[in-house]
Image (cartoon, rainbow, N blue to C red):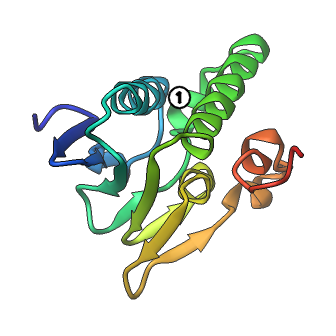
Amino acid sequence: MANEKIVALSEKGFAELQLNKSAKLNALDEEMLIEIERWFSVWEADASVSVVLLSSTNERAFCVGADIEVLSRQTTESMRLWEFLGNRVLDKIQNSVLVSIAAISGYAFGGGLTLAAACDFRVASEGSMFGQPEIDLGWITDGEELAAWPGMWE
């Protein structure tokens, strides 16, 4: 399991998704987003699961947001698809029948903070750090960030 970017565990009504891309502080890529969405769908279909904990295998970071290396290769069209996928995953978490809890340890930046915000509950360890560094890059937060805040689209 060490090479998997997402580790999925479940037992007795409880499931856990562990972000496991430690070398990049769990920077999100397309494969990770697709796996998060897939596991939420699997557990929504399983009547025995009612709670999902979203956590990290790395105490230094919950998630630092999008993988900048991946973003640097995006075209205008692939960037639209990336944003659509991100929005879809956030909507999946936010609108799930499952109770979702983000267990934050270390950095929760950008899309990682938004991922945590999409969960029903957030618990952070002492010393955790939160931020939206994309603002310093001149990026304006868009639907991806806004999709995570309850009531925003009502």
Looking at the image, residue 147 sits to the left or right of residue 82; the answer is right
Q: Residue at x 53, y 58 (%)?
A: 116
The percent position of residue 23, horizontal first and vertical second, equals 28, 48
Camera-nearest residue between 116 and 106:
116
Q: Residue furthest front?
A: 47
Q: Is residue 35 above or below residue 65?
A: above
Q: Residue furthest left?
A: 1
Q: Is residue 105 above or below residue 96?
A: below
Camera-nearest residue between 65 and 104:
104
Q: Which residue is mark 1?
A: 70
Q: Is residue 65 above or below residue 8?
A: below
The percent position of residue 130, horizontal first and vertical second, equals 57, 72
The percent position of residue 24, horizontal first and vertical second, equals 36, 47
Camera-nearest residue between 84 and 77:
84
Q: Quadrant of the N terminus?
A: top left
Q: Residues within 10 Å of mark 1 (few under 14, many from 20)?
A: few
Total labels drawn? 1
Amino acid marked by disc 1: Val
Q: Residue at x 45, y 54 (%)?
A: 100
The percent position of residue 29, horizontal first and vertical second, equals 47, 31
Q: Residue furthest bottom?
A: 126
Badge 1 marks a residue whose secondary structure is: helix
Looking at the image, residue 54 sits to the left or right of residue 22; the answer is right
Q: Residue at x 45, y 53 (%)?
A: 99
Q: Is residue 97 above or below residue 104?
A: above
Please identify the quarter of the rendering in which residue 48 is found: top left
Q: Residue at x 27, y 50 (%)?
A: 22
Looking at the image, residue 39 sits to the left or right of residue 58; the answer is right
